[in-house]
Amino acid sequence: MTAVAAVLTAAPRKRREWVYFLCLGILAVAVAAAVLAPWIMPYDPDATSFDAIYLPPGPAHWLGTDQLGRDLLSRIISGARSTLLGSIVLLALATALGVLIGLTAAWYRGWVDTLLARITDVMFAFPGLLFVIMIIAVFDSGTVTAVIGMGLAYAPVIAKFTRAIALEELARPYVDSYRLQGAGGLELSARYVLPNMVPTLLGYLVVLFGDGLMSLATLNFLGFGSQPPSSDWGLMVEEGRAGVIQGILGPALVPGLTIAIVVVATNVVGVRLSDKLAVRR
Amino acid sequence: MLALLRRLGAMVLTLVVSSFVIFAGMYAAPGDPLTFLIKNPEDRTPDRVAAVRAEYHLDDSFLQQYLSWAKDVLHGDLGTSFVYKQPVADLMGTRLPITLTLVAMAALMFIVIGVGLGIVSALKRGSAVDSSITGVTTFLTSIPNFVVALVLVSVFAVQLRWFEVSGDGEGFAGRLYHLTLPSIALAIGALAVVSRVTRQTMVEQQSLEHVDVARSFGLSSRKIIWRHVLRNSLGPVVTMCGLIIASMLAGTVVIESVFGLSGVGSMLVDSINAHDFPVVQAILLFMVVAYMTVTIVVDVLYPLIDPRTRERSEAA
């Protein structure tokens, strides 16, 4: 999952303004749907209707209905809430932990750095989602476990990135001059070094947000995260799978493609932001 | 040589710590293992409970349990499944071939296609072909692999009926046939990274002096590309491919579940849901070991592929 972020941020690209604005628009729509969900949903997302099972898209149900006759558009809109919120919480947790670890390692160097590097090494020894899957095996499936587990899994990635840019930042002359004025490590890091790193971090975090959304959806798809009747997008794909075998593709593909579109949009915006904001370096 | 030993030492240490983390996790899991071991409450007579506790060493201290588990694992005994009451090693043995075949097929696909696309990109640098290869592969990477898998099933298995929707297939040819869609789904996400790395290293190599010299000597551009540019680009490409193959083992968890393949990945999901901890432990450990083995093999291979790094690592 890290390799993807690294490649995306290092990608050679041309300036295509309209793609960037299109993606920004897609994200705005997703966020608006999540915020306004209770007011814009045409139906109750959990209301089953046995007269309306597997309806194709039509004027009454714009995206059709699922195996229980629930309106897919309403479920996508209400699912935007839990899907986006879950990804935001996991990223916030990972960022808080990762930045703390990365800054501490860069500031103290020496054995603290080595120890933190060893701990993150052990976490890197678990490929892909395996670390989160282990946490779920221990603490049982559920949204909270999945989000916290993912937050822990992403922390080392952010720690590594933070440490690298913090080392660069700490080598700058202004740090020495503040140090001479008697600023302590904590004050200096929090008040001067961290704000200077925010632009570089921000673009990276946006790309990671897409990555996290994708991984969280994967966990939900495997049944390790949100449980029915949640309309989390990953879980919707899982529930829609039963229809695929019968040739009814909507209930699985609508949420699946929604995830894909949002992740692609996030990546485009993230790459663009890191380009724009990190020019100074 | 010394660098390699240090690398091996670090790997063993990480392995020990990871195995400890895996074991401790399962040990700390809430819930009494007895409830999973004796399903029927009427069977919970004191004699039966004592027998089961003795059989699974539930009365030993944590450290004792870890050490005896680790010792057994080193002897090839991965414990007994709570659910199937069979040795975990046997259960994994029947499922490993599917997972390994799946990864091998996916690896073959992403290496051939990914490196191929990378070469085309590098040779046509800056052209429409180059940017569309970058665009399309990056786009494909951004789609979760379970969505890719479902789209493939919808189009090629349900609509066109070229492939079966699920199942492992009989015999070697049947197996390959059944694993075609799953391995495509597994490989697609890797194309962007591989083609990008290939393109990048080739572009760097092309601008080096010895390539200019070769060109000034009148060597055909085909010869220059194959013998000088591509040959010298192999190092980073092989490393990247190795890392991707290593992490693909974990990717099989998702793909095997979508396609209903009975490999090790889907077994992990099933055992987690069934609280079959010995199996979960064994599969997690297997995936970590496999991941680390592949990464270290790549490290060892690197100086063989690229002799220039040999002196450097010896000097360091």
Image (cartoon, grey):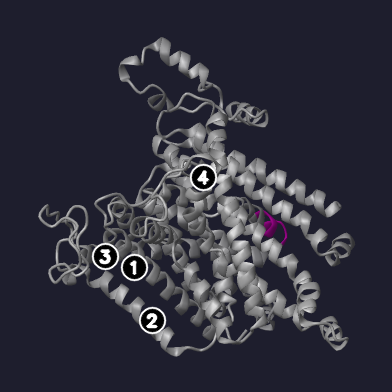
Calculate the distance from the C-alpha at mark 2 to the C-alpha at mark 3: 19 Å
Q: Nearer the viewer, residue A62 or B60?
A: A62
Residue underneath mark 4? B175
Specify the amino acid type for callout 2.
Leu
Is there CB contact under 8 Å for labels 1 and 3? yes
Residue count near mark 2 (Cα–Cα under 10 Å), binned few <14, some 14–19, many ≥20: some
Label 4 SS: helix
What residue do we see at 55% from left, 86% from top? B128
Q: Which residues are magenta?
A: A110-115
Nearest to viewer (mark 1 / mark 2): 1
Question: Which image quarter: residue B271?
Answer: top left
Residue count near mark 3 (Cα–Cα under 10 Å), binned few <14, some 14–19, many ≥20: many
Q: Is residue A186 visible?
A: no
Which x, y percent locates residue B26?
50, 36
Which x, y percent locates residue B228?
80, 75
A106 falls in the magenta region: no
Query: How many marks are shown on the rendered structure?
Result: 4
Which x, y percent locates residue A214?
43, 62
Residue underneath mark 3? A76
Is disc 1 in the same subunit as disc 2? yes
Is disc 4 in the same subunit as disc 1? no
Asked if residue B99 is positioned above or below residue B35 in the image, the reply reads: below
Residue underneath mark 2? A24
Calculate the distance from the C-alpha at mark 2 to the C-alpha at mark 4: 44 Å
Q: Nearer the viewer, residue B255 or B73?
A: B255
Residue A258 numbered tag = 1
A112 falls in the magenta region: yes
Calculate the distance from the C-alpha at mark 1 to the C-alpha at mark 3: 8 Å
Q: Earlier in the sequence, mark 1 or mark 2?
A: 2
Label 1 SS: helix
Residue count near mark 4 (Cα–Cα under 10 Å), binned few <14, some 14–19, many ≥20: some
